[in-house]
Image (cartoon, coloured by chain):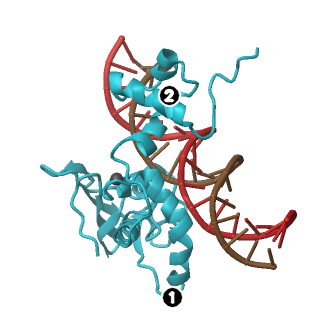
Chain colours: A cyan, B red, C brown
Amino acid sequence: MEGEYKYKKGLWTKEEDEILLDYIRVHGRGRWNRIPKVTGLRRSGKSCRLRWLNHLSPNVKRGDFSEEEEDLIIRLHNLLGNRWSLIAGRVPGRTDNQVKNYWNTHLYKKLNAIKKKQTPRKVAVVSTSKTTTHSSSAAQELAGDKLVHQHKLVEAPDSDSNFVTKSNDQNPNMDIVAAEDSNAEAEEIEWMAKHCTELLSCSSYGNMISWDMVEFQQGYHLDLL
DNA sequence: AAAAGTATCAACCGCTCGTGA
DNA sequence: ATCACGAGCGGTTGATACTTT
Ligand SMILES: [Mg+2]
């Protein structure tokens, strides 16, 4: 019993920061769980890591976001959805947490107000229970960069099966279209919802549907807009 | 002056992912 | 195959700062 609050929570003090910084100066970053053991700092390794990445690291830029940064974030979010780490990777000096905070507090409402007007770009990804995947040339790495490209050709089920549209949490610009009764390929739909960023093409020939999609990852050059 | 309402954002939480024994 | 571990992700909260009544 007692002593169960091994770790302190809440805001970090200057003194705690110094202990963490001293440790990192000597031992470097990583193996964060050792820090409370070695230094006696009453913070979980997880908390130490977060404190370093978001506040103590010299790479972190302080101060208000510039207009350029805001514009960049808006365009990246339009493309990538709530993938804050990916977005932050393209905004120098800003962390995923900063970008996420900025979006939630400053941009979300502002943009929704404007969004009332225009119709959103909508694309579809198709998968069904009774489909057969004909050419699932599985994720193929392109040389040199980090783009993953997928091409799928899928056979639709019986002619009378209906398609339903589901929204996609990961990417507001992309809905998912699936057969009403589909569940067999749920993992595939999930994978797409998670990874698929942009549908390059989607076409159907009779009961066949094909699509190309790309998954954006850190480091790949993006053309925004 | 003070309370009530709102905005901000650092940090927490639960979870997933990759790796290696 | 299973487990442990470190790292990382994104939704969400709660303490504080700021604004309005
Ligand atoms: Mg960054």
- Residue A195, horizontal then vertical, whole percent: 38, 54
- Residue A162 seen anywhere in this rendered image of the structure: no
Q: Residue furthest bottom?
A: A117
- Residue A103, horizontal then vertical, whole percent: 49, 64
Residues at marks 2 and 1 touching, judged by CB atoms closer than 8 Å = no
Mark 1 sits on what residue? A117
> What residue is rendered at 49% in x and 62% in y?
A102
Q: Is mark 2 within 8 Å of ligand 1?
A: no
A199 versus A46 height, above or below: below
The lab-note entry on whether marks 2 and 1 share a chain reads yes
CA distance separating discs 2 and 1:
46 Å
- Residue A13 seen anywhere in this rendered image of the structure: yes
Name the side, left or right, on which C5 lies relative to B12. left
> What residue is rendered at 44% in x and 26% in y?
A32
Displayed quadrant of residue A49: top left
Displayed quadrant of residue A3: top right
> What residue is rendered at 62% in x and 26% in y?
A7
Q: Which mark is residue A45?
A: 2
Q: Is mark 1 within 8 Å of ligand 1?
A: no
Q: Secondary structure at mark 2?
A: helix
Depth check, front residue: A62 or A136: A62
